[in-house]
Image (tube, rainbow, N blue to C red):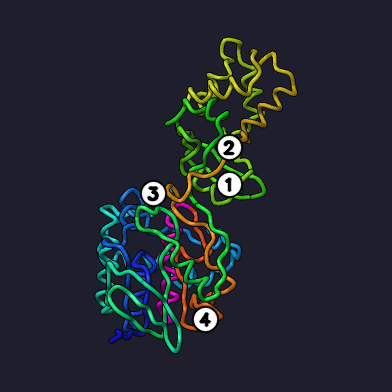
Amino acid sequence: MPQTFDAIIVGAGAAGLFCAARAGQRGRQVALIDHAETIGEKIRISGGGRCNFTNLSVGPGNYVSQNPHFARSALSRYSSQDFINLVTKHRIAYHEREHGQLFCDDSAQRIIDMLLDECARGKVKIMHPVTIQSIERGDDFRVLTSAGELRALRLVMATGGLSIPATGATGFGYEIAKQFGVPVTPLRAGLVPLALDAPELERYGMLSGVSFDAISRCDDSAAHFHAATLLTHRGLSGPAILQISNYWQPGGNVYLDLLPNIDSEEWLARLRARRPALTSFAKALGEHVSQRLADAWVNAHAPAKAIAQWTRAELDSVAALLKAWPLKPSGTLGYKKAEVTLGGVDTRALSQQTMEARAVPGLHFIGELVDVTGWLGGYNFQWAWASAAACGDAL
């Protein structure tokens, strides 16, 4: 005998849990199913175990999508302050870090417990570990699972993307979208370290572990990020690199400004004007980046003579390179190291107000499954909360 609900939500991550809680508290009978033994694993490991659950400043400009305006409606109707109010209501202590990022003082488990409490208030039936064998649609949605057949007029896919497969991430949500004719934009790893080719690794690989302040940019994008950059044994990482990876395209360059907020031409001119004993370019650059990096960079890019002997062309060349040091990544480190999945269910096929597929009444997609990807810093969690609220309130 099938179990009947008002809505079945597949995926008990951030978006699925919050959507179930919202719908349940509005009187809907909700089944939330997940294939994992432990639900909320991505929440648990996020933010170094402290969960960067939102950001104080959130807007559509903090997201990457083929339709950058799609997220505006959901984000405006459920703001970061709304989620902060919920966190405060549950007496979860939190603190602000740079750029408006909010983290739990204690463990990320507090956020999971909060979401489970909210689901309990809505009398949500959470079923896990439960595997899905098939999903069919007639007058309603019929979901055949390892726990029996479930039926509902509404089906919400909240299964997340392909990032961090160790947490149980799969492409199941994209498969269901395609099954019902809902288009999916190209997928790739996002917020991910970048790999460098052997020649550049040979030059800079010995600097693995060196971190420095920089502004990252890439070809054909106005996006830029001022944050820490980390050299690794495989290439580039750190917040500035993870951020720009959302905009980098294979075959293109990443450019690093090694002197943020400094005019490199004026800086070099001041160095030339010093007494000769004080004009070691490598030593001067080492005051702004690691000395090990400065030595390697100068060896690769600067004339092998005192600054006073540089020609105007050489000065201009070094000044330009300091502000836009080009590196050509060979690729990313893939979904295993990625924090999110870029691309997803095409927003043109969804309602901004309800996250419902226009061509398939009753079928909704929320969270990371959708082609809306946030910056590093709590933006992806805020999209999970906002898209879940839009959907949950509409069920």
Q: 265 or 10: nearer the eye?
A: 10
The picture places residue 74, in percent across and down from the top left corner, at: 49, 71
Q: Earlier in the sequence, mark 2 or mark 4?
A: 2
Q: Nearer the viewer, mark 2 or mark 4?
A: 4
Which residue bears the numbered disc 4?
360
Distance (Cα) linking label 2 and label 1: 10 Å
Residue 97: which numbered mark, if any?
A: 3
Distance (Cα) linking label 4 and label 3: 42 Å
Residue 121: image quadrant is bottom left
Q: 376 or 253: nearer the eye?
A: 253
**For residue 263, side relative to residue 109 (left or right):** right
Contact between marks 1 and 4 (CB within 8 A): the answer is no
Per the image, label 2 sits on a secondary structure element best described as: strand
Distance (Cα) linking label 3 and label 2: 24 Å
Segment colored magenta:
376-395
Q: Which amino acid type is marked by label 1?
A: His
Q: Residues within 10 Å of mark 3 (few under 14, many from 20)?
A: few
Per the image, label 1 sits on a secondary structure element best described as: loop
